[in-house]
Amino acid sequence: MYVGHGRCACAGITMGKVLHIKTPEMADTVRTSKTIEEELSLFESALGKAQAELESLITKAQQEIGAEQAEIFEIHRMMLDDPDICDNIRERIKQGGINAADAAIAVGREQAHDFEQLDDDYMRERAADVKDVTSRIARIVRGGEAVTLTESVVIVADDLQPSQTVAMDRSKILGFVLRHGTQNSHASILARTMNIPLIINANLPKSLDDSEQGGTAAAEGEDCLDLNGKFIGVNAATGTFYVEPNEATITQLQQEKDAFDQRRIRQLALRGQQGISQSGHRILTFANIGQVDDVEQVLENDGEGIGLFRSEFLYLGRSTPPTEEEQFKAYAKVASTMNGKIVIIRTLDIGADKKVDYFNLPEEENPAMGVRALRICLMQPEIFKTQLRAIYRAAARGNIAMMFPMVTRLSEVTEAKAICAEVEAELKAEGQAYAVPKIGIMIETPAAAILSAELAHHVDFFSVGTNDLTQYTTACDRQNQNLGKFYDPHHEAVLALLRLIAQNAHAAGIPAGICGELAADPELTDLFVEMGYDELSVSPGAILALRERIRASTTQCQSELSNARVHLGEIIKRH
Ligand code: PEP
Ligand code: MG
């Protein structure tokens, strides 16, 4: 049994036989034995058939999934009239030596590459469309039919084209496991609209064997194993899939599936409802995100806001830091997609397990306690200023707040705020459009928790990072798997600090939230209601379960909330 992992783009659990769809490739043998005229005529006739296929796809999409999604295929139909695509294919054929199918694929690749280089997200998405259109032409030239499903299958592919997704018989698609893809790709959007479990960025196997992992994952650029006909189990909620699962795994997946399906039906009914306990305490149910395209999942699960945007993910996996413009676009996109709902951007939290080379940080014996997060920003203010400028500018485009990670004392907050004031003055002098965001802090060190009464008078809100708070309070490295029960977020000391933080926030009239993993822990929801927490921020897929749990809570809130509530109302309704 091979156990693979990826990211959830549409939650759900499913099992079945694999249909492995390969991306059409250019032939690498003899390219054509026909004359140029014959190839041109094959192309023209394929163009006509492609038009006809798209006509019926548009009607099918309009009837089955809605006018908005049908527009994708309108775009494809328009592309068939686009001289940049069709004339280019004709030119390629006229140069000789290439068949019509390969010419279409080659032009599709080039044009897609050009789209992928563009700044505009909308235009970048067109790359998938142009590939879709040209591989349709190639398939027709080669005499292939659109994929027809004769039995229920789990579709495995490198990526899926929107038209492939819609053209298939929905009732026979059990799920998707894709090697590439993004939350925002058409295929993901369509899968969510059709509510089909979908894993993207899946590490498909290169080989299966009898080892503990059950095989080796294919590296980037390497071919993966043909999984056609193999049995696969998919838990898209956790992003895990099992190729040729054993009996025990099948039984476990079936149980998880039954429970998931029942729960999901109940929880989806809570969209548009509020998280109010039986005793009347309202807790906002927010989402944690790491990437711009995670927002789709937040909206799908009715997140009332984003309680933690881990902005450092924009900095990881690259050789230079993101520019002000890149960051501005990312933040503005999240804010505009959230359409007035609050987005709390956590400023750069590089360090510890999140490393980049380009800040030239020293190697450290103990990086979790080293130069990280706000410390880097205060030591290298230029890095901080670039991010602050982007945040202030994006705040003019939507409801953005920000918070600083890893605070330990007031002087760090005042120093950070002084840099914010400099940034504001600069933007003003330049005549840039900007807005001043509300400023909160993460409480994730015992020092900040102990000093929270004082800190609360200098910030607009608190958000507790229980992952680090547990690490620093219990002196247990959160990365160390050997610590077992010793890394315990339920530790009495952590819970005592959580109570203290909420009390001190409310005494100063500011709201308190939690954005660490503990926020989603159903065993503690009653306690959070009792402590009076105002907001809990969890992964998008966990929002509705949390809301359901809050609504079931009968605990009385013990905290004095009134001023914090007024303040919270101001923050979340800014726009
Ligand atoms: C936390 O520490 O709880 C937190 C939310 O931040 P991160 O997990 O990103 O360190
Ligand atoms: Mg943290």
Image: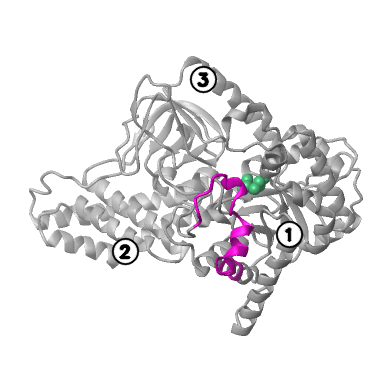
Q: Which residues are magenta?
A: 361-389
Instruction: Determine the secondary structure under disc 2.
Output: loop
Residue 506: in sight, yes or no? Answer: yes
Provide residue 403's location: percent of width, then percent of height.
69, 59
Provide residue 251's location: percent of width, then percent of height.
54, 17
Q: Which residue is mark 3?
A: 249
Provide residue 227's location: percent of width, then percent of height.
35, 29
Judge whether residue 562 is colored magenta: no
For label 2, the crowd category at 10 Å Cα-Cα, with few meaning under 14, some 14 to 19 and many 20 or more, is few
Residue 440's mark?
1
Q: Name the residue: 71% across, 35% down.
A: 489
Left of 304 or right of it: where is 382?
A: left
Judge whether residue 372 is colored magenta: yes
Q: Name the residue: 50% across, 43% down.
A: 191
Spatial CA span between label 1 and label 2? 53 Å
Q: Nearer the viewer, residue 164 or 513?
A: 513
What type of secondary structure mainly makes up the magenta span? helix
Q: Nearer the viewer, mark 1 or mark 3?
A: 1
Mark 1 or 2, nearer chain start: 2
Left of 105 or right of it: where is 185?
A: right
Q: Quadrant of residue 375?
A: bottom right
Q: Quadrant of residue 430?
A: bottom right
Q: Nearer the viewer, mark 3 or mark 2?
A: 3
Q: Name the residue: 62% across, 64% down.
A: 378
Q: Quadrant of the C terminus?
A: bottom right
Q: Which residue is mark 2?
A: 81
Q: Nearer the viewer, mark 1 or mark 2?
A: 1
Q: Nearer the viewer, residue 16 or 211?
A: 211
Residue type beneath disc 2: Asp
